[in-house]
Amino acid sequence: MDASRGRTADLDLVVVGGCGHVGLPLALCFASVGCRVGIYDTDRAKVDQVRAGEMPFMERGRTDTVVLVIGTPIDEFMNPETRIFERAVDELAPRLRKGALIVLRSTVYPGTTEFVESRLRDRGVEADVVFCPERVAEGHALEEIRSLPQIIGASNDSAFERASSLFEKLDVEILRTTPKEAELAKVLTNTWRYMKFAIANQFFQIAHRADVDYGQVLNAIKYHYPRATDLPAPGFAAGPCLLKDTMQLAAFTPDHFPMGHAAMLINEGLPGYVIDTLNARKPLKGRTVGILGMAFKGESDDPRTSLSYKLKKLAAFKGARVLCTDPYVPDPDLTSLPEVVKHSDVLIIAAPHQAYKQLDTNSHEVVDIWGWLGDGIRL
């Protein structure tokens, strides 16, 4: 990206929503291979960071290619909120060149690509619209964007060839599907991961209720047994994608996906299981609970949909004083790790950050369902 400002020039592509976890790494990758990349984002604070040089500067101009990294959120009823694309299309349509290429990047409700293309056409804009899902793990985006195969969901040869030319700049393998096949591939991938975490958490609860050390069971299952290598350990399954995409799939196939709803109940219910277990063992009222890790996963600064906050609410509801800490999440209400350890009666490893690996917890009651401290799964 050109760091100069105040100059108008044609761009190779514009990333809409480009200051976020999906858009900015993508913009950086295209910039690193010589593309002139513009970023558009409605989050003024993030845009100011980019302009201040913490990230590459924005560049004004026009382009034939727009990458849209707006995903489909779910509402309070766990249904997809698809109107976000109505607003986005209506805002973009007057600004698009004739024959533009629109690349949808974030997870969308199946059928969205076709809807966007149709809505643009209704507004007098002829454009090629493709779905090219990002499939990276947060924290590894810059590496994986340049290494993972890229699915391109295109409805015609022209759209596919234009999208291929864009992503071939990243020197990645290209796989063609229809738009809806690509949309389902993305949703099914995240749902499959969410369901794997759910079965791990269900197995843990079954063993724990039977007073069996699940860490020992899991080790016995996986020891030199290749067919069990993909069985994860228990833990809090959260983040901005997994639950959301599972509920999108459930909405896409109403009354035919009870396994998805069951996975949601198990994963979202795990914080309640932990708090209820602690409270049954010794009432939490008047005690201090320390929650270590407010991000949704280890070595992340992203607290979106983190189940640590559900833990906090449930413990407080039982009458506990709750102290929270995290080495990465920028929250002024958090407490330092030494203070949390010093003043807590119970410590809960909520996110497996490396900072907790060597933690001295001998004088505390500790919940470590990840087995992160090295002495087994503890609840």
Image (tube, helix red, strand yellow):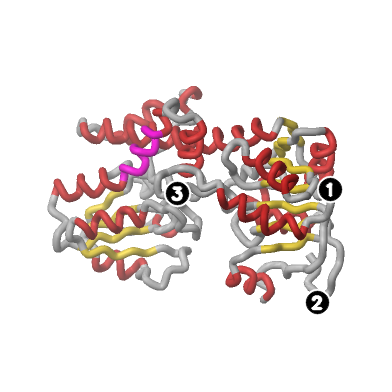
- Residue 354 appears in the rendering: no
Q: Is 158 on the left-hand or right-hand side of 341?
A: right
Q: Which quadrant of the rendered structure holds the N terminus?
A: bottom right
Indicate the quadrant where residue 376 lies. top left
Q: Secondary structure at mark 2?
A: loop
How many residues crowd around disc 3 within 10 Å: few (fewer than 14), some, or many (20 or more)?
few
Q: Secondary structure at mark 3?
A: loop
Quick check: is 169 in the magenta stretch? no
According to the picture, the residue beneath numbered tag 3 turns out to be 75
3 vs 2, front mark? 3
- Real-space Cα distance between discs 3 and 1? 33 Å
Q: Counting residues from the N terminus, which is met first, the one under dot 1 or under dot 2? A: 2
In this view, 221 is above or below 165: above
For badge 2, the amino acid type reads Gly
According to the picture, the residue beneath numbered tag 2 turns out to be 6
Quick check: is 267 in the magenta stretch? yes
Residue in view at x 25 percent, y 54 percent: 314
Q: Position of residue 228 (x, y in %)?
A: 46, 26
Q: Position of residue 68 (x, y in %)?
A: 68, 52
For badge 3, the amino acid type reads Asp
Contact, mark 3 vs mark 2 (Cβ under 8 Å): no
Contact, mark 1 vs mark 2 (Cβ under 8 Å): no
How many residues crowd around disc 1 within 10 Å: few (fewer than 14), some, or many (20 or more)?
few
Q: Of helix, strand and loop, which mostly describes the magenta segment?
A: helix
Q: Which residues are magenta?
A: 261-270
Q: Nearer the viewer, residue 230 or 63?
A: 63
Q: Is 304 on the left-hand or right-hand side of 70?
A: left
According to the picture, the residue beneath numbered tag 1 turns out to be 99
- Real-space Cα distance between discs 3 and 2? 39 Å
Q: Position of residue 186 (x, y in %)?
A: 60, 37
